[in-house]
Amino acid sequence: MTETRTGVSHPAAPAAAGSTPGFRPDIEGLRAVAVILVVLFHAGVPGVGGGYIGVDVFFVISGFLITSVMLREVAATGRISLVGFYARRCRRLLPAAGLVLVSVILAGYHWLGFLRGDEIAEDASWAALFASNFRFAAQGVDYLGSQSAPSPVQHFWSLAVEEQFYLVWPAALVLLLWLGFRWALPYWLIGAVVLSLAYSVGQAGTWSFFSPVTRLWELAAGCLLGLAAPRLRHIPYRIAGVMAAIGVALIVIAALTFDEQTAFPGYAAALPVGATVLVLAGRGDALLGGRPMMFLGRLSYSLYLWHWPVLIIAEQAAGRPLPAYTRALLVLVSVVLAVTTYLCVEDPIRRNRRLQRSHLLTLALAILLVTAPLAVAGWKTSTSPAADAGRGGEYQPRLGAPAAHVQD
């Protein structure tokens, strides 16, 4: 999840992706589309069986934005500051993630009992280290299949994949530029797309879904567009608008036609990925840049983090499938939590001037935000009755059969 701002100026009129750098209303709107699809899918809304492709939309956006930002930094300063890049990532991602993980650990123990709480605490520890995709793959979790008790932090797998990509691509870009191989960047990315997609098609099972290798090509597709953006400025406005409209339509078609039976990612992921590239290349400000969409786009990260644990913990605490009106109410609760988190935590920390001026202070904050969920998880598991059989703690589970419509 990367910042939408690609400069300081507002474009005077909609333009193709390669236009003068500025704020991208269409990207905020595209984020809104992505998070709406994911939330509707997780809330079990009929007809949106492929809403999980919203995550793939996020992947392409991330690849496009981080590449565009780094190349503009090279154009302006002649170099890329990796320290500055990772400091921005920490201020952007860690505050909301740390808050949600600590909240989920405490809520799990409170509403689901100590045995289930211990399991959630361990999952949250992996999520805090942005390695939960490896844990869920090792456990054989079926993202698109019914599970006995889905983890409330299972959706952190996508953040883990993004962060693993962030560890590799910026450093690789700096190295290639330092070696004078800027001309080779598109070839490296095309090779990454081809090999990763081929590997994704050839793989099966949970590793295919959670692996950073099978997802690499989706992020790399966005990176390729970031490299090509300057050449896109010559696309006529009307054609660019048609490109964006077609892209949005294809994203919606994928969400409405895919379901848990779709072999994913594999070939199927090419539809939402290609559609997202079309939207970003065409730049659909008129279609996606309305104030409601932009507002929801700004909330997309916090809403993504909150909605799944709210739905899962409530359903598992109830021990039965929840009716539609209850799920709708829980989604509204998630929106309220997302607004509060964005206004009180996410945005103030990201824009804090002291943190922006001091990488050391940002590092200290990052260490605190990563270790906080780990410390809370360690404290709860060490004091859990399960940690000492001699306490004679009695476990009275309130966890019932999961709802078939809730899948992650």
Image (tube, rainbow, N blue to C red):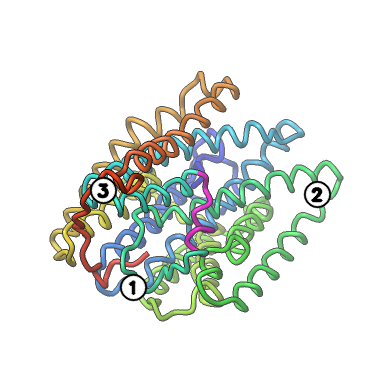
Residue 363 lies, with reference to residue 31, above or below; the image says above
In the image, what residue occupies the spot 51% across and 64% down? Answer: 137
Residue named by callout 3: 334
- 3D distance between C-alphas at marks 2 and 3: 44 Å
Q: Disc 2 residue type?
A: Arg
Q: Position of residue 198 (x, y in %)?
A: 66, 75
Q: Dot 1 lies on which element?
A: loop
Residue 132 lies, with reference to residue 272, above or below; the image says above
Q: Position of residue 121 (x, y in %)?
A: 38, 47
Residue 287 visible in the displayed image: no
Q: Disc 1 residue type?
A: Ser
| Range shown magenta | 129-137
Question: Does 170 sit left or right of 20 as displayed?
Answer: right
Asked if residue 135 is among those painted magenta in the image, a careful observer would answer: yes
**First in sequence: mark 2 vs mark 3:** 2
In the image, what residue occupies the spot 35% across and 37% down? Answer: 342
